[in-house]
């Protein structure tokens, strides 16, 4: 029966069967492992299984964010890794942990995998941390931080007439209004575009509302191979396309007006095979939304970030995995059929991942 | 808690040539087919082709392409007053150099403006030898010549302050230690006992709370040990070889790793030695031992006969 599931060439069908998203807060009193303990418990319960039935786990987190070398080793405590489990870790968003888990299931020897992402951005000043992840010769010694570099990309888009500061503020107002639909969100509510545009710049042309909040949070998600997914779940949400591409790191050598890696990832994931009803994009900065939508070829019929997106909660290292969980939620809980989750990494959208989900198959 | 990241990196033939040129107040790019890439890379960023070391001087002036204004610089930024980050296409280059523009105010910034380098007086072969770019066509040169030898290494020091949450369990464990007690937490499912205020059982993945607390015995046996010959690194104060021992507390499955052993010469440390905890007088603390938790100074021989079980060495974690 699994043959009826449309799939990427050469890939076995794998479905999402459960997930959990933590409360998103500015400053949690929980450790990263405690946050993970709760979302893993929530995700396996959502999938109707226990930790014992998980055959492979993969985590996305960042030592620089945690302030500790090998910080992910402590996070394994949240998995319940006895008897020993097959476990892996990526120093990337949990969306890439999900990618590895999905690849791992392709080996056809195990059925269930769990991916997670976690970050306590309140641990230190993100403006100091993210510059350390830049090119160590040319960029990190300048303290080139993510917001300053995003500001340069916003300027390029403004100069090219591809976006306006008003449109950027409108993205902030829309996403934070939509963000009211999720109890876990950190920043949501009703804002006024003109009032936002009257605020000072943080890194001109970016104002406070163009930036994501600084968030502590975690997310976990359970996937299973086709037969197991159908056994455990009435309506599995199928991963029908999954791809990621990276382009060169140095922003001065890239065309900042577009995102080739996003376009390539979308095509490789089969985005053109049908309409996308909802896209959950990791557009942490307001100007990135239209850039990503355009790179993916999304038209006005695609609803973007109805969960509120990263503007409403931005748990670094989990923001992308939350996008995929939300894309799944639009199918399971809101009756959509084909949705998309996107994640990004690196300065000015250097690396991009696209995950296409389908339900009702 | 402040974590320092003192990195020393080798530069290789291409980045080294760029950094050496900076000491000579020159900016170089590298040719790739008909393009000039600045700052130079070892491989073409589009095709991945390894590039011949065909360097070319660019600038010194250039044109601002994209920029953002930093109203409040961080401690890592090159300037301590408001400035712009910009991609600057230097004359003769086909890519943009990311650097600071010291324009005085945001009103002085515009896309397409012309800028020139301002050089530091002391140049060591580092991207910050370029102090910043300034508006106009005329570079601000500094005194002095280039490096006597080609630059091959660079230093990068960052320092970040972290605030780590202290959980209620670890607070109670610390408080117990101040009173000269070992606080354990026993998992209600598997009965394994943990120390140091662990928040949950890693086997059963459940939270451990005050109702799971137990007091642990103060005597145990050495299951393994290491004699450490100190090498000097930041924070290391020891100069002579010393021992660290793993102690298995009686009647539990708790191993305390890397404990201080008192009153025993390095040659006399052995597996099976019976030891007891030695505590400082409550309230005294012992600032001389930064490793110690609470008021535990270390372990000393208890005088009991050795435990001769050969399987002891397996109990190290």
Image (tube, coloured by chain):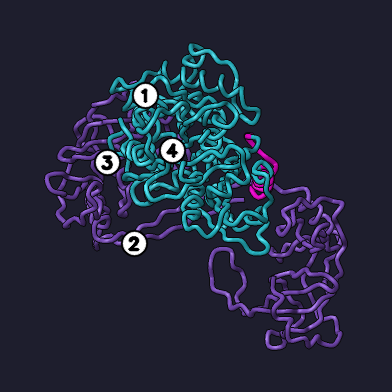
Chain colours: A cyan, B purple
**The magenta stretch spans residue A335:** no
Considering depth in this image, is B23 or A279 the residue closer to the camera? A279
Q: Give me the chain letter of mark 4.
A: A
Q: CA distance from mark 1 to mark 2?
A: 37 Å
Q: Residue at x 85, y 88 (%)?
A: B305
* Between discs 4 and 3, the one toward the N terminus: 4
Q: Give me the chain letter of mark 1.
A: B
Residue B160 shows up from this direction? no
Comparing marks 4 and 2, which lies closer to the viewer?
A: 4
Q: Which residue is mark 1?
A: B106
Q: Which residue is mark 4?
A: A146
Q: Which residue is mark 2?
A: B10
Where A30 falls versus B64 (above or below)?
below
Q: Residues within 10 Å of mark 3 (few under 14, many from 20)?
A: many
Q: Which residues are magenta?
A: A24-42
Assess whether mark 1 and mark 4 are in contact (beta carbons under 8 angstroms). no
Comparing marks 3 and 1, which lies closer to the viewer?
A: 3
Q: CA distance from mark 3 to mark 2?
A: 23 Å
Residue B26 placed where, x, y %? 20, 47
Q: CA distance from mark 4 to mark 1?
A: 20 Å
Q: Which quarter of the figure is the C terminus of chain B placed in?
A: bottom right
């Amino acid at each position: 029966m699994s043959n009826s599931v449309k799939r990427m060439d050469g890939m076995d069908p794998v479905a999402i069967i459960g997930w959990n998203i933590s409360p998103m807060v500015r400053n949690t009193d929980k450790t990263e492992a405690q946050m993970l303990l709760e979302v893993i418990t929530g995700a396996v319960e959502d999938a109707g299984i226990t930790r014992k039935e998980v055959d492979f786990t993969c985590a996305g987190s960042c030592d620089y964010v945690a302030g500790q070398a090998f910080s992910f080793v402590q996070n394994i405590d949240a998995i319940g890794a006895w008897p020993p489990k097959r476990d892996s870790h990526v120093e990337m968003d949990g969306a890439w942990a999900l990618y590895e888990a999905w690849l791992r299931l392709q080996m056809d020897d195990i059925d269930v995998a769990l991916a997670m992402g976690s970050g306590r951005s309140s641990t230190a000043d993100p403006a100091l941390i993210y510059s350390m992840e830049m090119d160590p010769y040319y960029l990190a010694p300048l303290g080139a931080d993510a917001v300053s570099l995003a500001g340069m990309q916003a300027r390029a888009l403004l100069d090219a007439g591809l976006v306006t500061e008003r449109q950027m503020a409108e993205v902030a107002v829309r996403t934070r209004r939509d963000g009211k639909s999720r109890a876990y969100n950190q920043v949501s509510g009703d804002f006024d575009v003109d009032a936002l545009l009257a605020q000072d710049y943080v890194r001109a042309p970016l104002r406070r509302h163009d930036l994501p909040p600084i968030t502590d949070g975690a997310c976990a998600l359970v996937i299973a191979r086709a037969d197991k997914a159908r056994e455990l779940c009435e309506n599995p949400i199928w991963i029908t396309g999954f791809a990621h591409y990276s382009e060169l790191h140095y922003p001065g050598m890239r065309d900042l007006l577009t995102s080739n890696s996003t376009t390539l990832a979308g095509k490789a994931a089969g985005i053109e095979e049908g309409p996308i009803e909802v896209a959950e994009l990791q557009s942490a900065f307001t100007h990135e939304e239209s850039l990503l939508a355009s790179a993916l070829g999304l038209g006005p019929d695609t609803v973007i970030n109805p969960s509120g997106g990263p503007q409403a909660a931005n748990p670094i290292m989990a923001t992308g995995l939350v996008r995929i969980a939300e894309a799944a939620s639009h199918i399971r809980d809101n009756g959509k059929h084909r949705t998309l989750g996107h994640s990004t990494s690196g300065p000015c959208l250097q690396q991009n991942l696209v995950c296409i989900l389908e339900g009702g198959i | 808690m402040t974590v320092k990241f003192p990195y020393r990196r080798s530069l290789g033939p291409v980045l080294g040539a760029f950094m050496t040129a900076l000491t000579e107040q020159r900016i170089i790019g590298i040719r790739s087919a008909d393009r000039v890439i600045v700052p130079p890379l070892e491989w073409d960023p589009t095709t991945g082709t390894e590039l011949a070391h065909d360097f070319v001087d660019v600038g010194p002036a250039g044109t601002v392409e994209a920029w953002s204004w930093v109203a409040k610089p961080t401690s890592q930024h090159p300037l301590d007053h408001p400035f712009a980050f910009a991609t600057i296409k230097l004359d003769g280059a086909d890519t943009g150099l990311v650097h600071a523009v010291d324009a005085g105010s945001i009103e002085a910034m515009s896309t397409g403006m012309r800028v020139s380098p301002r050089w530091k007086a002391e140049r060591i072969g580092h991207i910050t030898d370029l102090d910043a770019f300034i508006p106009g066509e005329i570079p601000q040169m500094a005194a002095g010549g280039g490096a006597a030898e080609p630059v091959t290494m660079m230093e990068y020091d960052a320092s970040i302050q972290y605030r780590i949450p202290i959980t209620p369990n670890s607070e109670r464990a610390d408080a117990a230690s101040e009173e000269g007690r070992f606080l354990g937490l026993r998992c209600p499912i598997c009965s394994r006992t943990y120390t140091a205020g662990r928040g949950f059982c890693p086997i059963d993945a459940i939270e451990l709370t005050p109702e799971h607390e137990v007091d642990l015995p103060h005597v145990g046996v050495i299951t393994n040990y290491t004699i450490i010959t100190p090498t000097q690194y930041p924070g290391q104060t020891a100069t002579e070889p010393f021992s660290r021992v793993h102690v298995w507390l009686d009647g539990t499955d708790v191993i305390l790793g890397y404990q201080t052993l008192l009153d025993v010469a390095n040659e006399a440390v052995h597996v099976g030695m019976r030891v007891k905890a030695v505590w400082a007088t409550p309230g005294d603390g012992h600032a001389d031992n930064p490793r110690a938790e609470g008021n535990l100074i270390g372990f000393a021989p208890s005088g009991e006969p050795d435990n001769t079980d050969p399987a002891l060495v397996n109990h190290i974690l």
